Amino acid sequence: MFTRTLSAGLTRALAVTLLAVAVSGCNALTRLEQVGSEPPQTGIENPAKMTGDRPLELPMPTPREGADERHANSLWSPGSRAFFKDQRASDVGDILTVVININDSAELSNETTRSRNAGENAALSSFLGFEGKLDKVLPNDVDPTSLVDAESDSVHTGSGEVDRTEEINLRVATMVTQVLPNGNLVIAGRQEVRVNYENRVLQLTGIIRPEDIRSTNEISHEDIAEARIAYGGQGQLSDVQQPRYGQQVYDILFPF
């Protein structure tokens, strides 16, 4: 009997182990094979495959006629935007560098105190003669001269304090996705950096004026209207810093 129980326990443990390996996928098997060995390097491949199997589609301006023509004995090409000044982003598909230097701090302190007292006293000594019959329904418990006597007392004290400091120094290349009728440019950009098992993601969208672009084809985040800047992480470290799903659901639903 003991041998049969031990055998059943080993079978369950082996099944759980195999299930865990199967759920973790090929990544776990690959890591087990590389125990004690140096991480292998990938072979040289066509760089175009890094963008995926499908051709990359991005916003592009309307092709200009004669833009690729070359004139003999001339430095000027038809369709060129400028000759003696820097090339700055001005059309759909152009790339613009956004400099993000955020160094904000906020300190708030609030305190609220509220106190309220209320009292009510009502009598029903005469009401069409029915007041004399109340003692038959509730004998010795009803006094028509003091039918309602209620008091309430409420006290509320609240305090809050916010002390926050944020500092972000980043540069991200964005692309002009639209030229508005008034000449302003809509820009959007995304940057991803993966280190080991942590992926840092930076996203930026907004509207800019062409005259705010510097000669170096850069613009500060402070000159972007309707700016939406998101900077965060995805990976093992970010998962550890977040509470479990059950804890988040509990915090939302628990009323106290």
Image: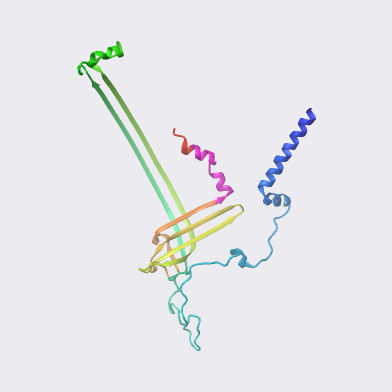
From the viewer's perspective, tell me whether residue 221 is left or right of residue 238. left
* Residue 82 x, y percent position in the rendering: 43, 78
* Residue 223 x, y percent position in the rendering: 39, 62
**Extent of the magenta region:** 234-250
Residue 126 covered by magenta stretch: no
Of 41 and 190, which appears nearest the observer?
A: 190
- Rendered image quadrant of residue 11: top right
**Extreme residue toward the top, this view:** 140
* Residue 163 x, y percent position in the rendering: 41, 44
Of 143 and 192, which appears nearest the observer?
A: 143
- Rendered image quadrant of residue 241: top right
* Residue 79 x, y percent position in the rendering: 45, 80
Residue 123 vs 106, above or below: the answer is above
Q: Which residue is drawn at 70% across and 51% down?
A: 31
Q: In which quarter of the image is the N terminus?
A: top right
Residue 83 vs 244, above or below: the answer is below
Residue 226 vs 71, above or below: the answer is above
Q: Which residue is drawn at 43% across and 55% down?
A: 102
Residue 125 vs 72, above or below: the answer is above
How does the figure colour the protein chain or chains?
A: rainbow
Q: Quadrant of the C terminus?
A: top left
Q: Give the prevailing secondary structure in the magenta stretch.
A: helix
From the viewer's perspective, tell me whether residue 47 is left or right of residue 93. right
Of 210 and 255, which appears nearest the observer?
A: 255
Q: Which residue is drawn at 44% across and 64% down?
A: 187
Q: How many numbered marks appear?
A: 0
